[in-house]
Image (tube, rainbow, N blue to C red):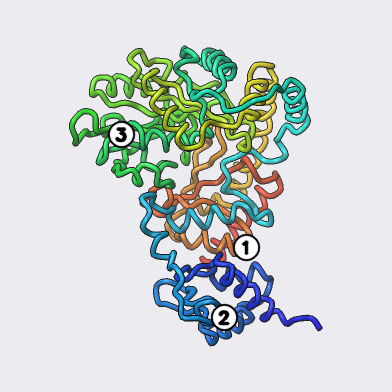
Amino acid sequence: MKKPKYQIIIDFIKEKISKGEWAIGSQIPSQRHLAKMFEVNRSTIIIALEELMADGLIEGIAGKGTVVTNNTWTLMGSGFSTNWNGNVTQGIHKPSVSTVQEINDAESDNRLIQLSKGELSPELFPLKEMQDIVQKVSEQLTPFGYEEPKGNLKLRQTISSYLKQRGVNVSPSSIFVVSGALQALHLISIGLLKEKSTVFLEEPSYLYSLSVFQSAGMDLSGVPMDNKGVKVDSIFQTKETGRNILYTIPTFHNPTGILMEEERREELMEYCIREQIPVIEDDVYRDLWLDNAPPEPLKAKDRHGNVLYIGSLSKTLSPGLRIGWLAGPESVIERLADLKMQLDYGSSTLSQLAAEKWLSSGMYEHHIEHVRNQLMIRRQRALDALEKYLDAFAVWDIPKGGFFIWVKIKPAFKVKKLFEKALSKGILINPGSIYKENEGQFVRLSYGFASLDEIEKGIYQLSEIIKDNNK
């Protein structure tokens, strides 16, 4: 006999609790999440939860939702289980804010229209070329172990040549291979900065959606922007030399898409050298220019070892490779390479060999030309849809590259509500609040991942949500 739906849900939750996967003190998923997971009405979820409460396994607690209070073992015996819920809030690394956690979970849901993702569509993934490169790499394999601390030498030599073409002249010994740009930021936060240091950054900024520097005891200090980039005259040092650093995304900034102009770059570098403020330049979007090639990186103007330069293949080729790099003074590179060895003993050898083939064979440059052409089509589709459906409700600037359009919703409609309503209708967007946009009126829309039809449909649905609210 087929079990009723509520009993299936009860059995599922009991199994999670009995295995210790949902430990005592932990919060179980929301009713909405469970209803979506089992494709049932919330009333069915409520019936299941009420029975589990009657069994003494869960309890509703004000401000915490529904939490696990017992498991089958503690109900059967006199022993006590570890309450991990107390421990998970005591670690030194801060959790993501709740909205970011919700977005991270939702980005793996293929049923949603993903207007949030900062990555290329699977439609743009060069599958045949990747298969060819992986096959060539596998045919040339010899027994391999751990790479040297800075990463595969041949890859670092190839990255050095790649950067030289973009105006950055750094030796392989000053380049360090990392598992994506985020790992570079994490290593900098734990390896170079004193506790209570200040990290200057654009406001808004992608970095606000992470907790990497705050978890290491740093303070974030936002600096306003205009359409030319960060406003240099708004950077005010409040601490002694050695306790400040600047993080910037000068090329196709995340989330605003702003491209810092040449004159502003020169002004910023002059200021940071004069005031002895080291710079972290996050340049992962550089190759995604659409109209004209951007100005040279800040690192190209660096004659004092003042700039730590971060690049990556995650935005232009494949996030699954987990290959990025950090260029800087050799003493800094060696320090961070030592820390990386303590964390993971080096990035994947296979990924490094594949990345080297991509960059040295000319296939990467051919691929990125195709990507630019496709992103231009996607950007135009998004702009046309915005003009057609959201012109009465929003304003935006045209990005010159990258993935993102920074859209300001007119004050009659709060973005937090738009985010929630859109998600309930199968559309995922990023509210500006996660980047510390204080007006509460901005959203970051990505045209990089969703299909052309999904881009238009998603923007149309956003307009319908706003219209319904205004009736």
Q: Which amino acid does label 2 sit on?
A: Leu
- Residue at 49% x, 25% y is 149
Residue wearing tag 2:
49
- Residue at 60% x, 73% y is 13
Q: Earlier in the sequence, mark 3 or mark 2?
A: 2
Residue 89: give its label: none
Disc 1 vs disc 3: which is toward the camera? 3
Residue 67 on image: x %, y %: 47, 73
Q: Earlier in the sequence, mark 2 or mark 1?
A: 2
Residue 66 on image: x %, y %: 48, 75
The part of the image, by quadrant, that contains residue 334 is top left
> 153 and 97: which one is in front?
153
The part of the image, by quadrant, that contains residue 304 is top left
- Residue at 47% x, 57% y is 99
Residue 193: give its label: 3
> 84 and 328: which one is in front?
84
* Crowd tier of the residue under label 1, counting other residues whose Cα lies within 10 Å: few below 14, some 14–19, many 20 or above: some
Q: What residue type is labelled 3?
A: Leu
Real-space Cα distance between discs 3 and 2?
48 Å
> 14 and 325: which one is in front?
14
